[in-house]
Image (cartoon, rainbow, N blue to C red):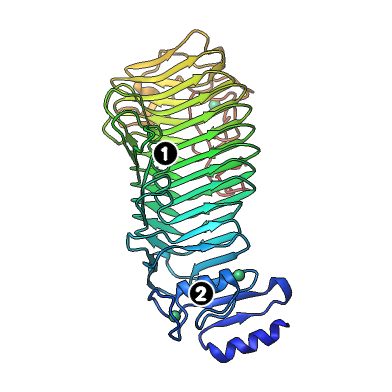
């Protein structure tokens, strides 16, 4: 049956629908939804729910024409109630649901009424673009708005998830896959979502061949809390990948996310774990005001990164500042741990505290490299607490200054290429009292770093060149770097200044 025949049939029945006939298996149907009410009864309209079903089954549903191989549902501004249960997408379905192009995503609202999730995607390809999804609710399961399994492709672009609550992992979104999986989250926002145990807003758990990229995305005010298995992980984001998987987290921010825990909380902002031979790269992420866990427990307030087996984690240009009330000296902002034959590096990053402690690092096995760090201002606790078991750890070109205990490192930690442990005064920094640890003109920290180290990256935390003058400086900030026209190069997803 030719697609032209189908197309003419649709037109006769549906005025507000546009069908694009692309021919053969590539045939696609576009739906423009003219009603904001929910429903799947035969009453002469085409609701959002009916369009999803038509796209999913490739059969006509009420006035929605049959879907094709790849369908698009476009929503004009409005609040679309969706209280009649979730819709499940088949593994063969390719579907994009989007706000009308040009609209502010917050004007195109899918309201789940606190009673169900929006979609359960089992394989296939799903894109949500330019939408606000709110009030998802799954009291006894994870994925308050979206549950993704099978071997899917999921794209979330300019999409907001607001106030979704799950009785399991992933207050808004849970991805739980075992097979080739692509997860792309871009320019999106997760706000005030709540989940249990892991992934207050987003939980990604992929066993094999996962490609997950999250960029330019905000996690704000989400909570994770204890479930039956105890300690919660990642109030904003929890990302665990295994097998031959790769993930990048680029230029994301984590602000005011909280783990509600009677004992420890691990990763108020984010929790990332790479196992088997996987690889996670975090570049240019910003954390502020995240926390959680009970007083006098070991808590990780912003980022907990664990690497094991033969995996790799690269953490570069993390900007971490404490804005929360700390619950004691064992409130660390960042914890990094390597096991087995894995490797982890943390470079060009700033940890700026008020109270509590800064960096906890543990090389149980593998290789853990710290370079070009500025860890400062932790009153009452430790700037760095560095421990090894059978692993190797090194600290290069770093500044641990103005903490009650600057550095508590066991003797096996190599500091052969580190900066001096003492001798810095407030005048070495632009405004140490105000928490600005950029170097001053006459700073002792200028041009005393070691060159050509494995932890040396092209750029400092300000995206300027790492080496200005004869040698690298100590800490996260290089003095005198340019930040001028000609930056924003390539597709690395981060800034890079060019030296003229
Ligand atoms: Ca209907
Ligand atoms: Ca379809
Ligand atoms: Ca220098």
The answer to whether residue 63 shows anywhere in this view is yes
Give whichever of 279, 381 is nearer the camera: 279
Name the residue that disc number 1 marks.
234
Whether the residue carrying mark 2 lies under 8 Å from ligand 1 is answered with: no
Instruction: Give the image quarter of residue 302.
Output: top left
Give whichever of 467, 374 is nearer the camera: 374
Instruction: Give the image quarter of residue 465.
Output: top right
Disc 2 + disc 1, Cβ < 8 Å: no
Q: Is residue 156 above or below residue 244?
A: below
Disc 1 crowd rating (10 Å Cα; few below 14, some 14-19, many 20+) is many
Q: Is residue 245 left or right of residue 34?
A: right
Name the residue that disc number 2 marks.
51
Q: Is residue 132 above or below residue 250?
A: below
The residue positioned farthest toward the bottom in the image shown: 12
The answer to whether residue 478 shows anywhere in this view is no
Q: Is residue 149 above or below residue 82?
A: above
What secondary structure is marked by label 1? loop
Q: Which mark is residue 49?
A: none
Q: Is residue 342 left or right of residue 134?
A: right
Disc 2 crowd rating (10 Å Cα; few below 14, some 14-19, many 20+) is many
Image quadrant in which the N terminus is located: bottom right
N-term mark: 2 or 1: 2
What secondary structure is marked by label 2? helix
Alpha carbons under labels 2 and 1: distance apart = 35 Å
- Locate residue 93, reporting x and y percent: 60, 64
């Amino acid at each position: 049956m030719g697609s032209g025949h189908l197309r003419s049939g649709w037109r006769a029945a549906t005025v507000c629908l546009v069908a694009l006939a692309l021919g053969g298996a590539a045939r696609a149907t576009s739906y423009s939804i003219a009603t904001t009410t929910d429903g799947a009864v035969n009453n002469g309209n085409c609701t959002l729910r009916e369009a999803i079903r038509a796209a999913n089954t490739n059969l006509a549903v009420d006035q929605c024409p049959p879907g094709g191989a790849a369908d698009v549902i476009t929503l004009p501004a409005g609040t679309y109630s969706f209280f009649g249960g979730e819709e499940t997408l088949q593994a063969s379905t390719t579907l994009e649901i989007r706000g009308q192009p040009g609209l502010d995503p917050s004007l195109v609202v899918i309201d789940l009424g606190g009673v169900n999730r929006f979609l359960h995607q089992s394989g296939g390809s799903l894109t949500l673009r330019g939408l606000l999804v709110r009030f998802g609710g799954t009291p006894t399961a994870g994925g308050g708005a979206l549950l993704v399994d099978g071997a899917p492709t999921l794209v979330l672009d300019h999409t907001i998830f607001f106030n979704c609550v799950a009785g399991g992992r992933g207050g808004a979104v849970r991805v739980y896959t075992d097979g080739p999986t692509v997860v792309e989250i871009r320019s999106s926002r997760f706000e005030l979502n709540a989940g249990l145990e892991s992934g207050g807003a987003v939980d990604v758990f992929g066993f094999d061949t996962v490609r997950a990229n999250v960029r330019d995305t905000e996690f704000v005010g989400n909570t994770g809390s204890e479930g039956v298995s105890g300690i919660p992980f990642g109030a904003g984001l929890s990302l665990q990948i295994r097998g031959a998987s790769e993930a990048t987290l680029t230029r994301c921010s984590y602000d005011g996310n909280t783990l509600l825990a009677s004992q420890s909380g691990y990763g108020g902002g984010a929790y990332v774990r790479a196992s088997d031979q996987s690889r996670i790269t975090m570049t240019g992420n910003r954390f502020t005001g995240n926390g959680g866990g009970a007083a006098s427990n070991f808590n990780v307030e912003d980022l907990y990164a664990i690497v094991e087996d033969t995996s790799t984690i690269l953490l570069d240009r993390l900007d971490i500042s404490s804005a929360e009330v700390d619950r004691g000296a064992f409130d660390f902002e960042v914890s990094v741990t390597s096991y087995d034959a894995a490797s982890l590096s943390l470079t060009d990053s700033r940890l700026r505290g008020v109270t509590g402690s800064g960096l906890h690092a543990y090389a149980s096995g593998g290789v853990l490299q710290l370079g070009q760090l500025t860890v400062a201002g932790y009153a009452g606790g430790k700037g760095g607490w560095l421990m090894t078991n059978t692993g190797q750890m090194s600290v290069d070109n770093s500044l641990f200054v103005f903490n009650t205990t600057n550095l508590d490192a066991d003797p096996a930690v190599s500091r052969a290429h580190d900066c001096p442990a003492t001798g810095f005064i407030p005048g070495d920094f632009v405004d140490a009292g105000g928490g600005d640890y950029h170097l001053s003109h006459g700073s002792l920290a200028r041009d005393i770093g070691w060159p050509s180290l494995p932890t040396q990256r092209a750029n400092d935390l300000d995206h300027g060149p790492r080496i200005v003058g004869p040698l690298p400086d100590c800490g996260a900030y290089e003095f005198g770097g340019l930040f001028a026209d000609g930056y924003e190069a390539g597709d690395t997803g981060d800034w890079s200044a060019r030296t003229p």
